[in-house]
Image (cartoon, helix red, strand yellow):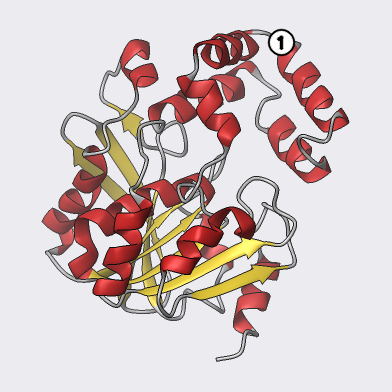
Amino acid sequence: MGFLHIPGLGKVHFHEYGTGTKPLLAFHGYGMTGRQFHVLEKSVLPNYHVYGFDHFFHGHSALDNWTEEQILAGMPKTLVREYVEAWFKVYGRQRFSVLAYSIGANFALILIEEYADLIDDIILMAPDGITGFKGFGYLTNKSLGKYVFKHVTKSKWLAPALLKNLKRVRFIDESLYKIAHSETDTQQKRLDVYYTLNLIRLLKPDMHKVAELINQHHIGCHLIFGRYDQLFPKSAAAHFISLLTGAKVNEAPFGHWLVTAALDEYLLNLPR
């Protein structure tokens, strides 16, 4: 493990694990750290040496004296490239692969835009970024959504009441309710959600460009969705999948909570 310093952004903490030799830059989902993928010990880790980055407001990564105003304005998309440039300074310019889950996929897809000629494989699990979850966009880009998001964050009772009502009207299912509740049951957790979603709100990959680059550079592409995932289901990515040539697409019998030992077994037993 170690730190990368990205000028204008901050100190990015990363974890190293895996028994393979091919470098794999990994971006985790909300509420986790760069160690999230260590459970894939049979299916992924034997092939790769993972560098798993902690998102800001997660793990040990820290912004360089950013004000709340800067955080709410969002991190410029151009700074995603600087993760890799900082990594190159330590490990040398070389080919690499990319792994991401949920909101981490925004970073991974932007790296395809920037480094397609250097990327061997991309593995995306329950990926945000392909179409995105409309609720996140509403909360971070629309005036009413931003107002509601801010006040729900500051209130002790609004968040649990809102989640219960969303579950009652079936906007979210029981599994998403449990995930959301566990991530918003304290003031600090609510602030972390608020700052995280606002910080990454500008990280929107150009999916037509990404598909073209994957095909042009023959990047190995493996997309894994949860069959019962209401946030980022396979159906929402259908158009993107149709643009790809030779991508592996799997729909595992799980919900959005996908990166588990059970997924490791599922991937290990897929036909070769």
Q: Quadrant of the N terminus?
A: bottom left
Residue in the picture at 45% in, 47% down: 129
Q: Is residue 229 visible?
A: yes
- Residue at the farthest bottom position: 272
Instruction: Between residue 24 and residue 243, name the one nearer to us.
Output: 243
Instruction: Between residue 41 and residue 231, name the one nearer to us.
Output: 231
Compared across the picture, whether 84 is left or right of 147 comes to: left
Q: Is residue 68 above or below residue 12?
A: above
Residue designated by label 1? 156
Q: Amino acid at mark 1?
A: Lys
Q: Quadrant of the C terminus?
A: bottom right
Label 1: element kind: loop
| Residue 92 x/y as whole percent | 12, 64
Residue in the picture at 31% in, 29% down: 75
| Residue 229 x/y as whole percent | 70, 53
Residue in the picture at 24% in, 74% down: 217
Mark 1 Cα-neighbour bin, 10 Å: few <14, some 14–19, many ≥20: some
Residue in the picture at 73% in, 12% down: 158
* Occupied quadrant, residue 267: bottom right
Q: Total label count?
A: 1
* Occupied quadrant, residue 13: top left
Compared across the picture, whether 253 is left or right of 263 comes to: right
* Occupied quadrant, residue 271: bottom right
Q: Is residue 194 visible?
A: no
Compared across the picture, whether 52 is left or right of 110 comes to: right
Q: Is residue 69 above or below residue 45?
A: above
Compared across the picture, whether 77 is left or right of 270 comes to: left
Instruction: Between residue 36 and residue 253, name the one nearer to us.
Output: 253
